[in-house]
């Protein structure tokens, strides 16, 4: 087997799709965790378990924290991981997991806007067109999903929690791309969780687990949260932060355009019907992702 080389465009795309698979499954795992635990407990458990998994690496890499990168690492920890974790679980108390995955596809739009306004990043017209096409495709999936094509009218204000989370992701992606130098994906992510993990642990000490313990499958649902933390956070964030160091902020953020595809695949697995329109929106999303990463040929 050839060695993974993220300078190679093929490996970049393979990594992007793999991340989409992981994060496209995260919403289902959150939903299962919410069957026994409150939204804040699911989020805090996710962050704390991730912190425990990162602990050996975080302790080893703490010496690499400097005055120059401390602020950026705090942003990666709190704005890039902890705050979105709480926002998503809060939203999923009223928003189904498939729709949460679809709304998450707004991230590249905010990545582009925040990068342009605060990080002096640039984007070619064709990249902007890709962003727009991808966003239209994602909105098409939301508007022409199940329930007779009326899903847009069923969106409630809890969806705004996801919108705020995508803004957080947009900030995080630009911070990693433009402000953090000299740290690998594993190093910067493990250090970031050294800051947020203890807060999550302290928070859990003051929450009431009586309802969770009264449910029949609290251990099984805790297992889903553990998978969410270890695979959907620890593994995925290391890969993601490494990917955007080798590519661009927009390309890394475009992972959220492919996530709805796997959300729909989970729906198929669960017996939901998929329409021809949805496959057309998926095709539009892929075109958008391609254009986001398009570079001028020499």
Image (cartoon, rainbow, N blue to C red):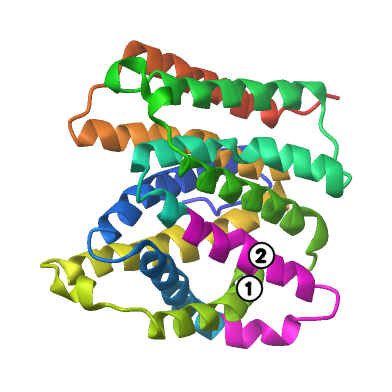
Majority secondary structure of the magenta segment?
helix
| Image location (x, y in percent) of residue 100 | 43, 41
Q: Which residue is mark 1?
A: 192
Outermost residue on the front side: it is: 157
Image side of residue 204 versus residue 197, left or right: left
Which secondary structure lies at badge 1? helix
Question: Vertically, is 17 above or below 174?
Answer: above
Which is more toward the observer, 181 or 254?
254
Q: Which residues are magenta?
A: 58-87
Q: Residues within 10 Å of mark 2 (few under 14, many from 20)?
A: many
Observer able to see residue 74: yes
Residue drawn at 19 percent across, 69 percent down? 218
Which residue is identified by label 2? 76
Query: What residue lies at 33% left-to-right and 65% top-to-bottom?
Result: 38
Residue 237's spot in the image, x, y percent? 55, 60
Residue, x 76% and y 38% (percent of image)? 113
Other residues around mark 1 within 10 Å, as few (<14) / some (14–19) / many (≥20)? many
Query: Is residue 18 toward the left or the right of residue 105 in the image?
Result: left
């Amino acid at each position: 087997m050839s060695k993974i080389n993220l300078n190679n465009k093929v490996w970049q795309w393979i990594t992007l799709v793999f991340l989409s698979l992981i994060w496209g499954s995260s919403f289902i795992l959150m939903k299962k965790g919410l069957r026994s635990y409150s939204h804040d407990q699911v989020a805090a458990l996710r962050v704390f378990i991730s912190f425990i998994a990162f602990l050996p690496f975080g302790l080893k890499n703490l010496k690499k924290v400097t005055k120059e990168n401390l602020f950026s690492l705090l942003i990666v920890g709190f704005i890039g991981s902890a705050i979105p974790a709480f926002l998503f679980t809060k939203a999923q108390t009223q928003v189904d997991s498939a729709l949460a995955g679809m709304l998450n596809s707004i991230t590249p739009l905010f990545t582009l806007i925040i990068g342009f306004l605060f990080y002096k990043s640039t984007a070619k017209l064709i990249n902007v067109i890709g962003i727009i096409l991808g966003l239209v495709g994602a909105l098409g999936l939301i508007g022409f999903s199940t329930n007779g094509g009326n899903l847009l009218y069923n969106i409630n204000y809890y969806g705004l929690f996801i919108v705020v989370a995508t803004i957080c992701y947009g900030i995080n992606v630009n911070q990693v791309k433009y402000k953090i130098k000299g740290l690998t994906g594993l190093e910067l992510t493990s250090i970031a969780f050294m800051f947020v993990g203890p807060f999550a642990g302290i928070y859990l000490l003051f929450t009431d687990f009586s309802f969770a313990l009264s449910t029949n499958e609290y251990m099984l649902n805790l297992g889903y949260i553990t998978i969410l933390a270890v695979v959907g956070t620890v593994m995925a964030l290391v890969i993601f932060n490494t990917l955007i160091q080798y590519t661009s902020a927009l390309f890394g953020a475009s992972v959220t355009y492919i996530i709805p595809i796997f959300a729909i695949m989970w729906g198929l697995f669960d017996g939901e019907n998929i329409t021809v329109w949805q496959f057309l929106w998926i095709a539009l999303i892929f075109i958008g992702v391609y254009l986001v990463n398009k570079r001028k040929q020499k």
